[in-house]
Image: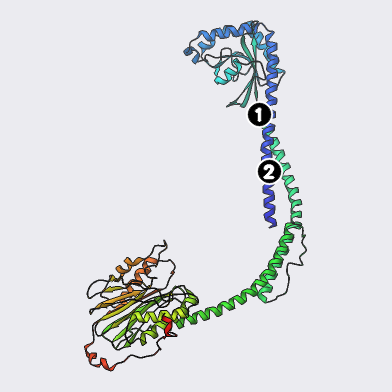
Amino acid sequence: MLAKVNRITLAGSFAVGMVMLIIGLSLYTAALTDQDIRESFTLARSAAAGAQRVPESRQVSEEVMKIYRSMTEEERADQYSEEYRSRFEEVMNSAEYKTMCEELQRLNTSTDIEFLYLGTYDRETCRLVYICDPDKDPATCCPAGTWEDVDAKEADKFLDWDGKGSLYHLDRDDRYGMICTSGYPLTDESGSIYGYVLADVTLAGVAKGMRLFTLQYIIALITVMIIIGRLMNRRIKKTVIDPVNSIADAARSYVADTYAGIKDVRHFDSLDVDPGDEIGRLTHVMAEMEESITGYEEALSDAVAEKERAETELDLASRIQSNMLPTAFPAFPERSDFDIYASMKPARQVGGDFYDFFLIDDDHLAIIIADVTGKGIPAALFMMASMIILGGNSRNESEYEPSQILEDANNTICLHNPANMFVTVWLGILDLSTGVLKAANAGHEYPAIRNGDGDFEIFRDKHGLVLGAMENYRYKQYELKLEPGSKIFVYTDGVPEASNASNELFGTDRMIEALNIDPKADPQGILRNVEEAVSAYVGDAPQFDDLTMLCLEFKGADKNRKDEQNKKHRPRNVARWVPPNEDYWH
């Protein structure tokens, strides 16, 4: 952490130093440049005052410009040709020209100006025309009539100067780099400008000053950064690093003691930390957290133990619920007149759906499928109670009337239903000798029926009230004649209401399509087709409701058993429910 703080400190100091360097260098450069500009302008003005006193300057300037303007642009194009130079020889050999050069040479040698010369700007051609240059170097001398193109802004600046401030122009030269041209106009008695005394000053001194300033600043910056870094390291180590390390050591000791089972030790209370700053408050928070975690661990241990007991009990309840349902298939291997298969896939460990089927006697098969309101343990308990009541009443109804069975079961449930739960039920009793199915529906899903060799279709039977909603409710029943090969499929709402990740329901239409994938399949195959279709549709979406299905196939009466029908009787395992008194129905 100390190394990281050092890096951040140094980086921050360096960034601030660089910003200050840029600002300082800019101001220093501007100051040096302004100084050179003022000096060159002052010298040009002084030289112009001296040239103004030489009457030959005006004469020389006017003669050079007269010759320049008399030539065509084609003649001016080759300004270094002998023909072009010969036109200005008379002027350059005149005593006036030589006197002007001597005066400019005298002024130039007494200053630090690189070049001091007389010239004028021609607005028409946008050129600077040299009038008199005292330079003795043939490589840099510009004889009378020599010209060079200039920027229009430079020409306008000199020609339109109002006499205020310094008159100068900055430009970059391939040989001298940045160069400043300062000037002062020469005027006649009427105030007309006939030339300019121009002074060229290179800014090499500015660049040299910038380099020297940068070097000195960087050395000073590094020195200051080293000093500040050392001082800050000592301070940060004492006030931040050491306290944080002590907190980290206390945390490691806490973890080690926790794994070792050592309790009743307060690791953060005894730390030597200033309580008035942020680290002190952090230490106080850590001490409170240690106390809270200790209490939480004890509570968590109790909760885990309680959860394990609950899981064990829930697993036992699931096994009990599963064992109550018929799960051995084939259920009646000795019977050739029908086949039946059922399955239940609960959404939780225990569910609220159930199915049941059993022979009331050798000729009558009872089929029940139901869905209890709610989920979890309450629904599972209510489911088991409802299953026992319905199964008991079905076995003890001598008339084989589903409506009466539902009515008796409803009254029993209403009598012992303080939680106001209810259950939807479809109940059917099939006469195996005739194929006649009597059924009643207490608020349950419509069954799907396949007659003979046809396809499955929804049979919209008459719904009654759910069991547990109201006492003494009269249920209606109906009869269906099943032909050999007919099938009946009953289910809970978990099938059509199964939803995918987009919360779109599987629906009754898709269920019928799944049933008719292979309507000739046996009951187990029928259920497998539906379950696979639901699973493919739902995908990875979670299961929200129990998935319960039952399929019965009637194959036709067994003729070999008709002679023994009268010898069979129904088992009476559970007593039929009887109202408390005769006035109960009124």
Where does label 2 land, which residue? 16
Mark 2 element type: helix
* Depth check, front residue: 27 or 221: 27
x, y percent for residue 55: 66, 5
Residue 150 visible: no
Instruction: Report which quarter residue 427 is drawn in.
Output: bottom left
Vertical relation: 541 (above or below) 525: above
Name which residue type carries label 2: Val
Q: Residue at x 38, y 70 (%)?
A: 493
Where does label 1 land, which residue? 204
Nearer to us of marks 2 and 1 is 2
Vertical relation: 581 (above or below) 120: below
Instruction: Report which quarter residue 368 is drawn in.
Output: bottom left
x, y percent for residue 467: 41, 76
Residue 473 as seen in the image, left or right of residue 568:
right
First in sequence: mark 2 vs mark 1: 2
Q: Count neighbours of disc 1 (C-alpha within 10 A) and say few if under 14, some if 14 to 19, many if 20 or more.
A: few
Residue furthest bottom in the image? 567
Vertical relation: 459 (above or below) 23: below
* Quadrant of the snapshot with the N terminus: bottom right
* Depth check, front residue: 27 or 446: 446
Name which residue type carries label 1: Ala
